[in-house]
Each structure stands twice: as C-alpha cells, then as structure tokens.
Amino acid sequence: MRFLFVIITGSFLLLSDFSFSQIFIHPNFGLKSHETLVIEKVELTSIAATFFLSIENRIPNGSFCADKNIFIVYPDGTRSKLVSSENIPVCPDTHKFKDPGEKLDFTLTFPPLKPGTEWIDLIEDCSDNCFSFYGVTLDNDLNGKIDDAFLLSGNDEPVKAMLSFIDITEAVDKKNLGIEGFLYMNIIRLEKQNGNEVKAAQWYTRMKSSGAPRLQQYIKYLNDQGIKY
C-alpha cells in the first residue's frame, strides 16, 4: 500500500505541475537589440521559466554565443539569473553559421517566475554586442489584442490599427506595463503616417509624461528615427 501511495503521489505532482503551466507563443515586447533574434515561445511552470529563442544569420561567416550572465529583470528591478542553456555556446565559445539565412534555435531556462508576473525584461549582461528584450508581455489576452492591431496595420488599415492601439493604451494606462512605451510609439508613428502631425505631437507629449518603464529608451528610439516634437 505504501508503494502504491508513492506512485499516486508522484503522478499527482506531475499533473499538478502540468496544470500550472502557461505558454506564450511569440509574446510581444517593446524593444530588442538584435533584429533577427526572436522569442518563439515562453513556457512557465512551477519549476522553471523556459525561453525558446531563434536567431537568423544575415552575414557571411557570422557567429553567435550567449554569455553566462543572462537575467530576467522584474518590474521592480530585481533579477533572476539564468540556470541553464541548450544548443547555444557560452561566450567566448561561438556557434559559427555556415551561410547567411541559417537559423539557430536555442533555449534559456530560469527559476520559476514570481506569482502574478505580467511582464519582464530579458537582459544579457556582458561587455560586447549583448542582447536584450524589454517589456516581454506575459498576458495572452493582451498579446492577442496587440497582434490584432498589427494585423490591421499589415492589411493596410492604418486608421483602424491606430484606433486599436489607442484602445489598448487607454486600457493599460497607469498599470506600469513594460509594453506601454511601445504602444505609444505605434500610435505616434501611425498618426504621423496618416498625416496627423498635431495628434502625433500630442501623443508624443503624453508619452513623455506617462512614466512608462524604460521611457527614455523609447523616446531615443523615436528620436533616432527622426520623430521628435
């Protein structure tokens, strides 16, 4: 009977861990460092947070590696360090691509996230060409709404896309979400694209006073594109 109890208990633990899993496919984020670096999926369980990433090589004789000092940064600034990685060399060892267009898939595993975490930054803390993702959104409902707004933009419906981004921004305003600055950026660019310079300037001013996480980096990104009011 004791042996049977152990088996049942073990099965229960496995099922419990599975029931607490969350998966986010291509989660939205605010800014990233490497153009072809993609978060394909994030899987959260009670024992780990696993990030599935890919990067595409665009140059002859390209190479890539990941430093051992990679962190999840929480909204309050606390950090959680990388536990393990798979299919990616640890710098200074490198993966050498054979040709432009080749992709490398790899995973990064961290301790389980704090309960209630809605977004994080993923930061490589190194000395050269470090990668980063700011405002990775861990909310499937919000991700779906942002995806729908991008779909409208991709279907050449910029006015509808802009209105959708405005609705999302109004809904998340003052929630201190990492994606907030990104939402403002899209509204500003779409207003400008639609020829509404006055409204673009108004949203730019509102963005500057929003207190969005990493606000100065979003403003710099716009300024580097020649958008400044």
Image: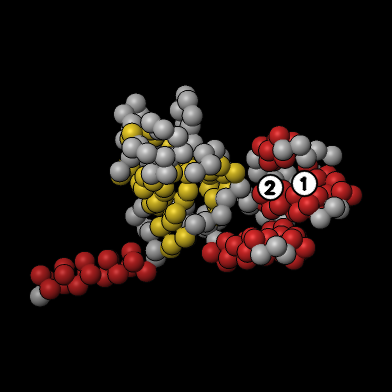
Check contact, mark 1 vs mark 2: CB within 8 A.
yes
- Mark linked to residue 66: none
**Label drawn at residue 181:** 2
* Label 2: few (<14), some (14–19) or many (≥20) C-alpha neighbours in 10 Å: many
Disc with the residue nearer the chain's start (1 vs 2): 2
- Report the Cα–Cα distance between label 1 and label 2: 7 Å
**Quarter that holds the C terminus:** top right
The quadrant where residue 83 appears: top left
Q: Quadrant of the N terminus?
A: bottom left
Q: Which residue is located at x 19 percent, y 72 percent?
A: 8
Does residue 157 sit above or below 221 in this rendering?
Answer: below
Q: Label 1, on which residue? A: 207
Q: Position of residue 75 (x, y in %)?
A: 57, 46
Q: Give x and y (percent) for residue 51.
A: 41, 50
Q: Quadrant of residue 23?
A: bottom left
Q: Is residue 216 above or below residue 179?
A: above
- Camera-nearest residue between 142 and 75: 142
Could one spot residue 19 in this view of the protein? Answer: yes
Residue depicted at x 16% and y 68%: 6
